[in-house]
């Protein structure tokens, strides 16, 4: 059974209850089950730490931590065990699927490994009584959980009156072993109208994330990622910036092998309400351009800004693939108190989503002094149709990646605070 639809509609909560009741009513010879999410830690956050989870609602449930974390459920037919696992690595999911499972609950199937999904369906099919429940926002049409399984699935037209046309047209409705249920915003028992309106304003209409998270349907997006969002309200005159309001600044670095090497200086305001691109340094990558010349140009630029911001400039974050450059810059940076580190490994689709949301909330701004070129280059970044960007080794990607690295230390903290208009 697949539970599909937008974010925040209660799929995990209701799917968890459905899983719980199936386990509660399972006969004595069915006692081993699994809940699998992106990682074991994610599964614990969703079903152990969440006060609304069935584990914390029903007194006959208890959590056992350790090497094999699991939920114990005492039923009339005996003790049941629900093991928790992740599908992010084969090492993790083979431990779970190595068990003789009577039922499997999978969270967010659209980001699960293809081999894991196939193996999970094999496990659920080899025993006549076994079952599989999955939840998802909209995924890509060619993902195998659609093409090999749920596209041939069955849905109840009477109980799914709001199922989007994209889903109706994709399913053949020929195999009732693969049941499909759609949860729209109107099916949520907790979302209020203002919350729904806010969700609709999170992503650009027609973007991959709008289709997946807001409409809850499969499908690509086409065109440009940021061009429709960016406007003059995102630009701020440098002389109008209260420089003392920028409490911390980081520099992101992307080395373009045949395009541009870009350094981006970005600062955040009190309580991480807004981020401002203060300045960028662009270096053309010519045949005779080496690390020494890049670092010399960077140091001259850095010293100029250090005289203004001093110790508020905390880090230089460099593309993690450039280990040699990171070491050379670390050893030769003009201000040794500024840490030079490698960028994190955040996925491109997450970086795209973060920038889109900040732009739509007018929380990512660009100074007219040095942020204008980043603003203009972002308008050129193309959508790959799958939530990421098209990387043809062009300058706009160098600018976009450099901006991402300058933001990555701040993004999670920016998400914690309510935006002040």
Image (cartoon, rainbow, N blue to C red):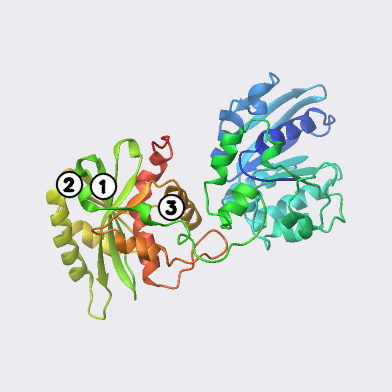
Between discs 2 and 1, the one toward the N terminus: 1
What residue would you read off at disc 3?
Answer: 355
In which quarter of the view is residue 304 placed? bottom left
Q: Check if mark 2's residue and mark 1's residue have beta carbons within 8 Å.
A: yes
**Disc 2 crowd, CA 10 A, few/some/many (<14, 14-19, 20+):** some
Q: Position of residue 71 (x, y in %)?
A: 66, 29
The residue at 59%/47% (across/down) is 92
Q: Nearer the viewer, mark 1 or mark 3?
A: 3
Is 87 placed left or right of 98 in the picture?
A: left
Q: Position of residue 58 (x, y in %)?
A: 69, 21
In which quarter of the view is residue 199 placed? top right
In which quarter of the view is residue 184 placed? top right
What residue would you read off at disc 2?
Answer: 309
Q: Check if mark 1's residue and mark 3's residue have beta carbons within 8 Å.
A: no
**Location of residue 235 with respect to 254 vertically, above or below:** above
- Give the Cα separation between the discs numbered 2 and 1: 8 Å
Is 394 placed left or right of 172 in the picture?
A: left
For the residue labelled by badge 2, is the local secondary structure a helix, a strand or a loop?
helix
- Give the Cα separation between the discs numbered 1 and 3: 17 Å
Disc ID at residue 249: 1
Is 247 placed left or right of 156 in the picture?
A: left
Q: Position of residue 88 (x, y in %)?
A: 57, 50
Q: Is residue 411 visible?
A: yes
The residue at 33%/35% (across/down) is 271
Q: Quadrant of the C terminus?
A: top left
């Amino acid at each position: 059974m697949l539970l599909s639809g937008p974010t925040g509609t209660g799929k995990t909560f209701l799917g968890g209850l459905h899983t719980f009741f199936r386990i509660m009513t399972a006969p004595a010879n069915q006692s081993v089950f699994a809940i699998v999410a992106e990682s074991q830690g994610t599964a614990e956050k969703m079903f152990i730490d969440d006060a609304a989870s069935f584990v914390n609602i029903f007194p006959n449930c208890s959590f056992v931590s350790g090497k094999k974390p699991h939920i114990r459920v005492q039923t009339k037919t005996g003790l049941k065990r629900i093991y928790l696992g992740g599908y992010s690595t084969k090492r993790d999911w083979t431990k779970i699927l190595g068990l003789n499972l009577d039922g499997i609950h999978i969270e967010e199937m659209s980001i699960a490994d293809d081999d894991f999904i196939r193996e999970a369906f094999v496990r659920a099919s080899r025993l006549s009584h076994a079952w599989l429940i999955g939840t998802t926002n909209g995924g890509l049409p060619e993902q195998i959980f659609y093409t090999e399984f749920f596209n041939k699935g069955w849905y109840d037209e009477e109980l799914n009156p709001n199922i989007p046309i994209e889903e109706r047209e994709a399913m053949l409705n020929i195999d009732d072993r693969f049941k499909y249920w759609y949860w729209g915003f109107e099916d949520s028992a907790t979302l209020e109208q203002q919350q729904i309106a806010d969700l609709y304003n999170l992503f650009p209409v027609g973007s991959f994330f709008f289709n997946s998270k807001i409409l809850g349907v499969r499908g690509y997006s086409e065109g440009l990622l940021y061009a429709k969002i960016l406007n003059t309200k995102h630009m701020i005159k440098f002389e109008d910036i209260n420089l003392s309001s920028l409490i911390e600044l980081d520099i992101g670095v992307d080395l373009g092998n045949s395009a541009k090497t870009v350094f981006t200086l970005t600062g955040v305001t009190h309580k991480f309400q807004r981020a401002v691109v203060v300045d960028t340094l662009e270096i053309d990558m010519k045949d005779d351009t080496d690390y020494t010349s890049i670092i010399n140009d960077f140091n001259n630029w850095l010293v100029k800004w250090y005289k203004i911001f001093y110790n508020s400039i905390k880090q230089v974050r460099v593309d993690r693939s450039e280990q040699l450059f990171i070491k050379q810059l670390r050893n030769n940076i003009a201000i040794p108190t500024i840490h030079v580190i490698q960028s994190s490994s955040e996925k491109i689709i997450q970086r795209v989503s973060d920038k889109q949301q900040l732009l739509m909330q007018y929380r990512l701004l660009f100074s007219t002094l040095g942020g204008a070129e980043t603003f203009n280059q972002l308008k050129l970044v193309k959508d790959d149709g799958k939530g990421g960007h098209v990387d043809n080794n062009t300058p706009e990607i160098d600018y976009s990646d450099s901006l991402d690295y300058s933001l990555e230390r701040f993004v999670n903290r920016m998400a914690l605070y309510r935006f002040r208009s």
